[in-house]
Image (cartoon, rainbow, N blue to C red):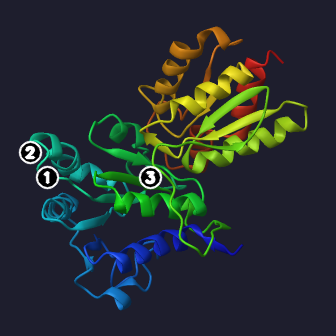
C-alpha cells in the first residue's frame, strides 16, 4: 500500500469530495494563492478555481458566518481555521449558529459544513497559540467533533465529515501534517463515532486520540518490554464518543489510563472516567488514572513545553501505578 503524508491525505479527501459534489467548497485564510498555511490545499486553486477555493481576510467570525449561511442555502462549505486558537474569534457562529440552527428552525435547515484546522500545541508558540479545544466543542450539542491521529483515519473521516448533514469540527495537528502512513488509493469512508483498537492487550486499557496517540502507543511499547500488555484505543471522535468499545475493553483488562492534551478540568478524560465508573465499576481493579497537560497556560521556553505535555514517562508511571507495580 502506498505511503503519503497526513496533509496529502486531507487534500485527497477534499479533492475527491469536491469532484463528486459541486456544492463542496473550501474557504479560509491563505487556502488558495498560498496553497494553505500548511500546504494542505496545495494545487486546489488550480483545479477548482477561485469560486470554490476562496481566500479570506483575517476575519474568522466573518467567514465562519458566511459558511453557515452557505450551508443553510444548500452548499457544503469546508471552513479552514489557520489554527483552532483563532476559532475563539468565530465561536459565536460555530456555537450559536451552526450548532443550533437545525433545532431552532424546527428541522428546516441542515448545516452540512466542516470547520477544520490544527489544534493543540506545536512547540514554542506561546500561551495563545498552544491550546486544545476538543472538549470545549464536544460540550456543545449539535456539533460532531473528530480528532484523527494518522493519515488513513484523517482521509476516511474527513470524507465522511464533508458528506455529513450536521456541522463537524475536524481537529488536526500542525505537528502531524508531515507524518506519513499507509492510505489506500481506492475510496473508503470511516464512520464518525466509532473508536479503533490500535493495539490489543490484556492488562490495562489506554485511551487517547489525536497526536497524543503517539504517547499512548509509545508507552505500550515500553511496557511490553516488561511483560505488561496494553490495549490502546484511539477514540477518533470525541462527540459522539464510542463508550461501548472503551467499556468492553475495561471489562477485559480491569484497568484504565486516559491520556490527552487538555487541561484536566472538564476534559474528555473526565467524561470517559465518569462513564466507565458508572457502567463498569465492578470490573475495575484500580482507580482510573488520567494524564493531562499541566493546569496552566503553556509557556514559551522548551523546558515549559516538555513539562506541560503528556509524555511516555508520565504515562508509563501511571500505568504501573494502576498495575500496582
Q: State which quadrant residue 258 falls in.
A: top right
Residue drawn at the location 45% of the way across and 40% of the way down: 238
Q: CA distance from mark 2 to mark 1?
A: 6 Å
Q: Is residue 135 left or right of residue 231?
A: left
Residue position for label 1: 109
Residue position for label 2: 105
Q: Is residue 94 left or right of residue 211?
A: left
Q: State which quadrant residue 35 falls in.
A: bottom left
Of all residues, the one furthest to the right in this rendering is 226
* Front position in the image: 169 or 124: 169
Image depth: mark 3 or mark 2 in front: 2
Residue drawn at the location 59% of the way across and 39% of the way down: 208
Secondary element at tag 1: loop
Residue position for label 3: 119
Q: Can you see residue 89?
A: yes
Residue 143 in the image: x percent, y percent? 30, 44
Residue 100 in the image: x percent, y percent? 17, 42
User: Within 10 angstroms of label 1, few (less than 14), some, or many (20 or more) residues?
Assistant: some
- The quarter of the image holding the N terminus is bottom right
Q: Are marks 2 and 1 in contact (CB under 8 Å)?
A: yes
Q: CA distance from mark 3 to mark 2?
A: 31 Å
Image depth: mark 1 or mark 3 in front: 1
Q: Is residue 253 left or right of residue 42?
A: right
Amino acid at each position: 500500500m502506498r505511503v503519503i503524508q497526513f496533509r496529502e491525505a486531507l487534500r485527497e479527501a477534499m479533492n475527491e469530495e469536491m469532484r463528486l459534489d459541486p456544492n463542496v467548497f473550501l474557504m479560509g485564510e491563505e487556502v488558495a494563492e498560498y496553497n494553505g498555511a500548511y500546504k494542505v490545499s496545495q494545487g486546489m486553486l488550480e483545479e477548482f478555481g477561485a469560486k470554490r477555493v476562496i481566500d479570506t481576510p483575517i476575519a474568522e467570525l466573518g467567514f465562519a458566518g458566511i459558511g453557515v449561511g452557505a450551508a443553510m442555502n444548500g452548499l457544503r462549505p469546508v471552513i479552514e481555521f489557520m489554527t483552532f486558537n483563532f476559532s475563539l474569534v468565530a465561536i459565536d457562529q460555530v456555537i450559536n449558529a451552526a450548532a443550533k440552527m437545525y433545532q431552532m428552525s424546527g428541522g428546516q435547515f441542515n448545516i452540512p459544513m466542516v470547520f477544520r484546522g490544527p489544534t493543540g500545541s506545536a512547540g514554542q508558540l506561546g500561551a495563545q497559540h498552544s491550546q486544545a479545544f476538543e472538549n470545549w466543542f464536544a460540550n456543545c450539542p449539535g456539533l460532531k467533533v473528530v480528532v484523527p491521529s494518522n493519515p488513513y483515519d484523517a482521509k476516511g473521516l474527513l470524507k465522511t465529515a464533508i458528506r455529513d448533514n450536521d456541522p463537524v469540527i475536524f481537529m488536526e495537528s500542525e505537528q502531524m501534517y508531515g507524518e506519513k502512513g499507509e492510505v489506500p488509493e481506492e475510496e473508503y469512508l470511516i464512520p464518525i463515532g466509532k473508536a479503533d483498537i490500535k493495539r490489543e492487550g490484556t492488562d490495562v486499557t489506554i485511551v487517547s486520540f489525536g497526536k497524543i496517540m503517539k504517547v499512548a502507543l509509545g508507552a505500550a511499547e515500553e511496557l511490553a518490554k516488561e511483560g505488561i500488555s496494553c490495549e490502546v484505543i484511539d477514540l477518533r471522535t470525541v462527540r459522539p464518543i464510542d463508550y461501548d468499545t472503551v467499556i468492553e475493553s475495561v471489562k477485559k483488562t480491569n484497568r484504565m489510563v486516559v491520556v490527552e492534551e487538555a487541561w484536566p478540568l472538564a476534559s474528555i478524560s473526565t467524561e470517559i472516567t465518569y462513564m466507565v465508573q458508572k457502567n463498569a465499576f465492578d470490573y475495575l481493579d484500580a482507580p482510573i488514572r488520567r494524564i493531562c497537560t499541566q493546569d496552566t497556560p503553556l509557556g514559551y521556553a522548551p523546558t515549559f513545553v516538555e513539562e506541560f505535555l503528556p509524555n511516555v514517562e508520565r504515562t508509563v508511571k501511571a500505568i504501573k501505578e494502576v498495575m500496582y507495580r
